[in-house]
Image (cartoon, helix red, strand yellow):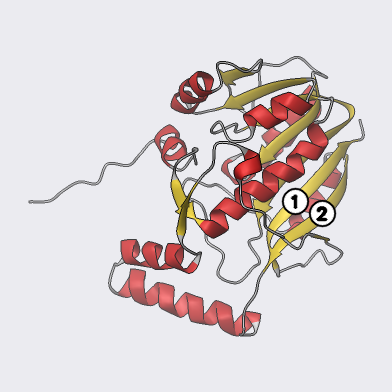
Amino acid sequence: MVVQKIKKSFDEVMYEYTEWPDDDIPLDDLNFISDRYFKALEFCRSKDVLEIGAGSSIAKKEISEVSNSYTGIDICKDNILRISEACKDLQISFSVDNAEDMKFDDNSFDVVIALAMVYYLDLECFLKEVKRVLKPNGILFFCTSNKDVPGFNKAPGSKKYLNVYEWNTLLKRHNFSVEFQGSFPLKSFMKLGYRAKVISILKSFFIETFGLSNLWKKLREYSKGSLVKIPRYLADFPKYESNTSNIKDLNDNKNKIIYCKCTNLS
């Protein structure tokens, strides 16, 4: 009997891979979440904030406490239903919306944050929409994985990743002033080129040769550290020094995470 594999919709993938409080995840992933939200909070103080790809309830209480207003959108209806229930006691707004064609008026927000999700989007459409809804001199703050780091893996359902050089070119073309920071520098006893080659060989061995994709996934998760529960509040996240530094080399291939502050010049 042939079992046909049913392809999941994009909404289903987004719901499945959204991290929620009390979920068990690798410690490294928890540190990524903590780092990006603590950085985002600094841009939200006394501002009208839009979060694109709001995902789960993580950090919503903290953002609502420091911002002038908070609006969150997500393309996944189930995420919005769940997050609306989880945050019903907060004075914030959620809705289902498409980041490539948003319902908001022009010049609606001081700050737009988009954390670990830009690679799911048509970036040309996304940046045009962000420009439209941002006020003059407003800030777009986002983070993304650095595709040039050896061992990089795409997220399920993702469209396209850019490296620092490509982001710089694209954002300047859309008339943003850009500042890049790198975080979570790769630590390895091997030179980067050799490490990438070893990872490629192992991945080919497990997936392409023997079709053991689930085992490969488990081994990668194990390499990230032990599983821990996601806390409900940012104050309860473990403290972690991410070694953030300004990126001067647009060919950066050492920092796992790229942070970008983009100022709207028009």
Quadrant of the rendered image containing residue 69: top right
Q: Mark 1 or mark 2, which is nearer the start of the sequence?
A: 2
- Does residue 122 appear in this view? no
Q: Secondary structure at mark 1?
A: strand
Residue at x 76% of width, y 37% of height? 41
10 Å neighbourhood of mark 2: few (<14), some, or many (≥20)?
some
As drawn, 77 above or below 25: above
Q: Give amino acid for label 1.
A: Tyr
As drawn, 13 above or below 213: above
In screen coordinates, is 159 left or right of 192? Answer: left
Q: Do the CB atoms of the residues marked 2 and 1 lie less than 8 Å apart?
A: yes
Question: Which residue position is annotated with label 1?
Answer: 259
Q: Give amino acid for label 2.
A: Phe
Question: Which residue position is annotated with label 2?
Answer: 180
Quadrant of the rendered image containing residue 235: top right
Quarter of the figure that contains the C terminus: top right
| Image coordinates for residue 39, horizontal then vertical, percent | 75, 45
- Does residue 150 appear in this view? yes
Q: Which mark is residue 57?
A: none
Residue at x 75% of width, y 51% of height? 259
Q: Residue furthest left?
A: 1
Residue placed most toward the observer, 84 or 99: 84
| Image coordinates for residue 132, horizontal then vertical, percent | 79, 24
In screen coordinates, is 172 left or right of 6? Answer: right
As drawn, 240 above or below 170: below
In screen coordinates, is 217 left or right of 188? Answer: left
| Image coordinates for residue 165, horizontal then vertical, percent | 78, 59
Q: Secondary structure at mark 2?
A: strand
Residue placed most toward the observer, 236 or 54: 236
10 Å neighbourhood of mark 1: few (<14), some, or many (≥20)?
many
Q: CA distance from mark 2 to mark 1?
A: 6 Å
| Image coordinates for residue 23, horizontal then vertical, percent | 44, 43
